[in-house]
């Protein structure tokens, strides 16, 4: 796995829901089921890459924080909205609702050119939402002064809300001390992290998965969301890389990781290889720290989805508790013929890879 230089990737475009009449005019490509997946990935009536699907009280909620990012001038002045679309099924999501403009809440991202003030175009990207029984909604993402890869840090941060409603969100800040300090000490080569996920462990501690701090995935833990956050370290005080054993195979470097805990003894991790993404790899673990390949890998490639660009995969456990649903972002045509990241859905059984899947 090569140490990755910052990717100029164009973020997650605004989450859109098409009316049925328009949706019928957009033909989905015919896809085969990728390795290990039970069925071909089917297009949902929504766009976005950094999406999170929750199900509360029988209602599905698709959360994201879209930010164009592709044009620095265009994003200046653009609000950084946290959005949600709800519905009875993933295939029947309603209209997108703007929940919260996040920029005014971000109070610790300074202007690199004028450090006595907040960065005027500060933003959040790589959003990852969970719902916790004690805290409520926890938004984990990465904040940046302005979308300018290679010269500014992109660092993990946390927002919370007891209900998810507008004007109930609190910004807890960049993860401190160690994730912030590690970037600061690198000077002109700050950390550019895509995050990876956050989990409330059964022992009460919190665990954050982070790329960008080494050549793979590092792990930081804290007793509470406010910190202090400290990295898991090895015998020589190095940051532990929990995906190190697969560094030979991931030629382009780790990107856009997504962690899913099914139970205390079953964890899954999807990693995008390089940018543009060459493949998506799937790992599984019994404790979230010791990871193994989920059968033969890589699991998803552009070729396996009709030779279209892919970006990342986010996942959730379905209500039956027997299946994992994966939300794959595929670059595809949208209304008016424009191309964007479109959400596609498929399923795999919970549990480790079977002998049959390992042999595929």
Image (tube, grey):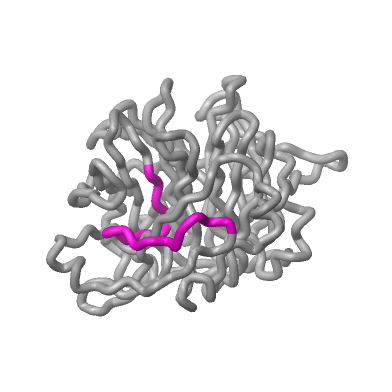
Residue 245 in the image, given as x and y percentages of width and height:
79, 54
- Whether 326 is drawn above or below 235: the answer is below
**Could you tell me which residue is drawn at 27 percent across and 36 percent down?**
59
Instruction: Depth check: give the residue in front, 135 or 41.
Output: 41
Q: Is residue 43 magenta?
A: yes
Visible in this render: residue 110? no
Q: Residue furthest front?
A: 356
Q: Is residue 329 left or right of residue 245?
A: left
**Could you tell me which residue is drawn at 25 percent across and 79 percent down?**
337
What segment is highlighted magenta in the picture?
36-53
Quarter of the image holding residue 263?
Answer: top right
**Could you tell me which residue is drawn at 23 percent across and 37 percent down?**
166
Q: Residue furthest left?
A: 21
- Which quarter of the rendering shows the N terminus? bottom right
Residue 349 in the image, given as x and y percentages of width and height:
53, 44
**Could you tell me which residue is drawn at 35 percent across and 64 percent down?**
342
Residue 50 in the image, given as x and y percentages of width and height:
42, 54
- Whether 225 is drawn above or below 185: the answer is above
Q: Is residue 92 magenta?
A: no
Quarter of the image holding residue 300?
Answer: bottom right
Q: Residue furthest right?
A: 235
Instruction: Depth check: give the residue in front, 322 or 302.
Output: 322
Question: How many numbered discs sit on the rendered protein?
Answer: 0
- Whether 278 is drawn above or below 156: the answer is below
Visible in this render: residue 59? yes
Instruction: Depth check: give the residue in front, 196 or 295.
Output: 295
- Which quarter of the rendering shows the C terminus? bottom right
Residue 269 in the image, given as x and y percentages of width and height:
60, 48
């Amino acid at each position: 796995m090569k140490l990755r230089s910052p990717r100029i990737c164009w973020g997650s475009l605004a989450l859109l829901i098409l009316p049925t009449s328009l949706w019928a005019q957009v033909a989905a490509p015919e896809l085969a089921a990728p390795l290990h997946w039970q069925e071909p990935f089917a297009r949902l009536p929504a766009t976005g890459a950094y999406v999170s699907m929750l199900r509360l009280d029988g209602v599905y909620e698709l959360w994201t924080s879209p930010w164009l990012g592709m044009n620095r001038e265009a994003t200046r002045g653009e609000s950084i909205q946290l959005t949600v679309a709800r519905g009875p099924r993933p295939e029947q999501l309603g209209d997108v609702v703007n929940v919260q403009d996040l920029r005014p809440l971000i109070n610790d991202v300074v202007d690199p050119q004028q450090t006595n003030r907040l960065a005027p175009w500060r933003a959040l990207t790589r959003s990852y939402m969970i719902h916790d029984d004690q805290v409520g909604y926890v938004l984990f993402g990465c904040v940046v002064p302005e979308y300018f890869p290679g010269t500014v840090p992109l660092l993990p941060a946390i927002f919370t809300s007891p209900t998810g409603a507008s004007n109930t969100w609190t910004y807890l800040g960049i993860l401190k001390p160690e994730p912030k300090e590690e970037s600061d000490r690198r000077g002109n080569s700050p950390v550019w992290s895509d995050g990876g996920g956050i989990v409330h462990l059964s022992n009460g501690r919190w665990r954050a998965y982070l790329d960008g701090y080494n050549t793979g995935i590092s792990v930081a833990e804290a007793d509470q969301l406010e910190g202090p956050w400290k990295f898991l370290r090895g015998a020589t005080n190095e940051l532990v890389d929990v995906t190190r054993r697969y560094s030979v195979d991931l030629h382009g470097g780790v990107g856009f990781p997504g962690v899913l805990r099914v139970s205390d003894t079953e964890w899954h991790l999807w990693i995008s290889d390089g940018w543009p993404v060459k493949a998506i790899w799937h790992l599984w673990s019994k404790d979230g720290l010791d990871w193994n390949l989920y059968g033969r890998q890589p699991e998803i490639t552009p070729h396996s989805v009709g030779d279209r660009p892919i970006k990342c995969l986010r996942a959730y456990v379905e209500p039956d508790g027997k299946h994992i649903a994966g939300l794959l972002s595929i670059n595809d045509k949208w209304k008016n013929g424009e191309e964007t990241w479109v959400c596609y859905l498929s399923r795999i059984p919970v549990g480790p890879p079977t002998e049959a899947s390992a042999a595929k």
